[in-house]
Image (spheres, rainbow, N blue to C red):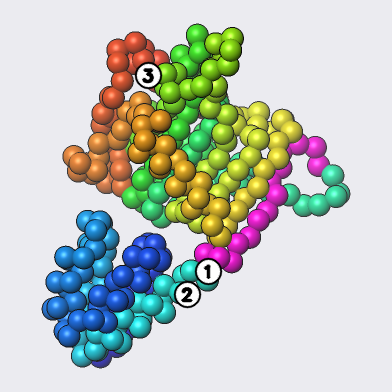
Amino acid sequence: MSHQPLAIAATKLASILPMPTLQLVARLIEESASLAEARTKLAQELPHPQYRSLANLLIDQWNESAANLLPQTVSMMVLTAAHSEQAHRDAQSVELVWTGPETDAAPFRRTEQAILQVLESATQQITLVSYAVYNIPYICDSLVRAAKRGVRITVIVETPDRVAGEAEYSTLRALGPDVASCCSVMYWPRENRQQNEFGKVGILHVKCAVADGHWLFLSSANLTEFAFTINMELGVLVRGGNLPRQVEDQFKELMRLRVLLPVYRSTAWSRGRKNGWGNSGPLEPNITRPTLKFLNFNIRHRP
């Protein structure tokens, strides 16, 4: 009987769960006298339903392909996979990303290419943040492809009515209906923003893309055609290490604390996947009627 399917299952588990949870899984399995007892302990002790489900897949594979293995051996497989994944995550690489005049000083990645690499590499989740969004067909197409792979997508944008109508175009309309139907879109409400002594409120000026806690694109560039073609923009593309996870967790915490609120959410996760997409489906409005006025989605993300 081949143990390779179980090894693959342990590796996959290690690629998804955080290290403390993996260590807990390994300990619970090691302390079990049998496969059945390990399954029970994991169901009782793991705090998160998704973690329990993923750990149960490992137990299923253990039962199907390697039921003769002792719990202590399976525990060691989980720990080995966990430490291997941790070493891979810690092996950080950083590249400079550029839009603007070319020189012979050094080779740079192009801005749009770097963002597309982050989006195309995603297997679980994407967080995309920008002050401005306009005329970005390749980015929109990549987001739709990610949704079809089952990737959860959160887009955080500056809203056009954020400060007395300063914006000249709707960042939400620029996404287009295809992207809107497969993403959860968040915004920073005016009432949650700080103001100076003259009543000027802060603006959302972050430009970044994060995928799976492993990829991070951070730049001066907005998600606009000019930022990808004729502006002078500088950024970094980070793979591995702690930085992508830290940025991802920062925005998750802002959403948990309701500093960032949903404009609308895709409801396919709860209503099924009628189109065969990972998280596509009808929109679930979460805003008042005045704010809905700019969700008329005239297609402006293509020439």
Q: Nearer the viewer, residue 218 or 105?
A: 218
Judged from the image, the secondary structure of the residue bearing numbered disc 3 is loop
Residue that mark 3 sits on: 295
Residue 191 in the magenta stretch? The answer is no
What quarter of the picture does the N terminus occupy? bottom left
User: Residue 198's x, y, as percent?
Assistant: 59, 9
Q: Residue at 21% of width from left, 65% of height from top?
A: 45
Is disc 1 in contact with disc 2, using a CB cutoff of under 8 Å? yes
> Which of the 4 quarters of the picture holds residue 252?
top left
Vertical arrangement, residue 57 with respect to residue 147, above or below:
below
Q: Is residue 248 visible?
A: yes
| Earlier residue among tags 3 and 2 | 2
Residue 189 x, y percent position in the rendering: 42, 22
N-term mark: 3 or 1: 1
Amino acid marked by disc 2: Ser
Residue 18 placement: quadrant: bottom left
Query: Is residue 107 rendered to the left or right of residue 87?
Result: right
Identified at 58% across, 46% down, the residue is 217
**Residue 88 image label:** 1
Which element carries disc 2, helix, strand or loop?
Answer: helix
Q: Tag 1: residue type?
A: His
Q: SS of the residue at dot 1?
A: helix
Residue at x-position 35% and y-position 81%:
77
Q: Which residue is mark 2?
A: 84
Q: Is residue 106 shown left or right of residue 287?
A: right
